Amino acid sequence: PGLASCKEGALSGELLRQPIGESIRYFLDVNGLSVGKVDFKIEAKGAYEGDSVIEYRSLFQLDSLLDVMLPMSGQAASLVPKNGSSPRMAMNRYSLGKNNYDERIEVDKSGKVVLSKRSKNEKTRQLQRTFDFPVQDFLSAFYAFRLQAKKDGSGCTHIYANQRTYTVWFYAAGEEEVKTPVGKRKADKYRVEFGSERSKKMRRGHIWVSQDGNYLPYKAEILGERHIEARVHLYHFPRQ
């Protein structure tokens, strides 16, 4: 309720083409308490099933998950064609308490047909989904948003992960100064609304993105009973 359907994906143009080796680290807070860190890195160039692809990776380590004191850690990777925005292959693997999860996603060249295999401990489930426009996983959406949000100002996309579809809308919300590790910086602010097909609750938040050519997300927050905030801590831009 309250979340518009997404008829045309705004992140299906292209990803931000930063140099191999660009890395970002965020610290995560929940209700003002530090709970862990998340790293993003543009890892390598290579080939996958005849396509030239770029490999994006993420590592995350959470000391506690919200107010349920369970450790969570894991990794994700995405192989995205140089001239596309949808991954050809994506994976995420993580542990939550005593449970281990492993998902592999394969996407056809159109970006619209997704085959996923997801296991929880020893139990595996396979699903195939077809979409009206190219979809992203969380990693490719992160890099596509950095560029396309500036170009379009507002729009929506579908993100497929954990064998469910998330609808995400973003809207330009002006400019603000935000605190960064190197002082206050002016940033473009975006309002975000999202929800998954398995939940009846819409979530809201904001993202602040740098105004230089790096389009670095300085900060992101999810509003609600639990205020979740990610703050940039380290940023490495390799010189080519």
Image (cartoon, helix red, strand yellow):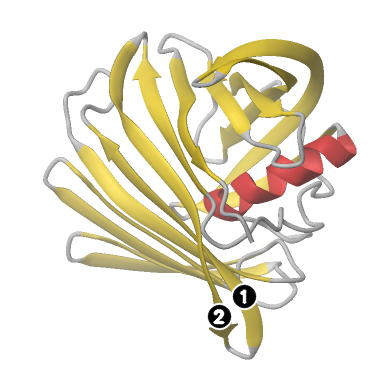
Residue 11 horizontal side relative to residue 136, left or right? right
Graded by Cα atoms within 10 Å as few (under 14), some (14 to 19) or many (20 or more), the crowding at tag 2 reads some
Looking at the image, residue 4 lies above or below residue 117: above
The tag on residue 13 is none
The reply to whether residue 137 is in sight is: no
Upstream in sequence: badge 2 or badge 1:
2
The residue carrying mark 2 is 46
Front residue of 136 and 140: 140
The answer to which quarter of the image holds residue 190 is top right
The answer to which quarter of the image holds residue 85 is bottom right
Looking at the image, residue 170 lies above or below residue 14: above
Residue 204 horizontal side relative to residue 110, left or right? left
Residue lying at 28% horizontally and 24% vertically, measured from the top left: 35
Front residue of 115 and 95: 95
The residue carrying mark 1 is 53
Residue lying at 37% horizontally and 9% vertically, measured from the top left: 31
Residue lying at 33% horizontally and 43% vertically, measured from the top left: 60
Tell me the amino acid under the disc marked 1: Val
* SS label for mark 2: strand
Most distant residue in the front direction: 239
Q: Are marks 2 and 1 in contact (CB under 8 Å)?
A: yes
The image position of residue 208, as x and y in percent, is 66, 23
Looking at the image, residue 93 lies above or below residue 46: above
Q: Residues under labels 2 and 1: Cα distance?
A: 5 Å
The image position of residue 107, as x and y in percent, is 60, 72
Tell me the amino acid under the disc marked 2: Gly
* SS label for mark 1: strand
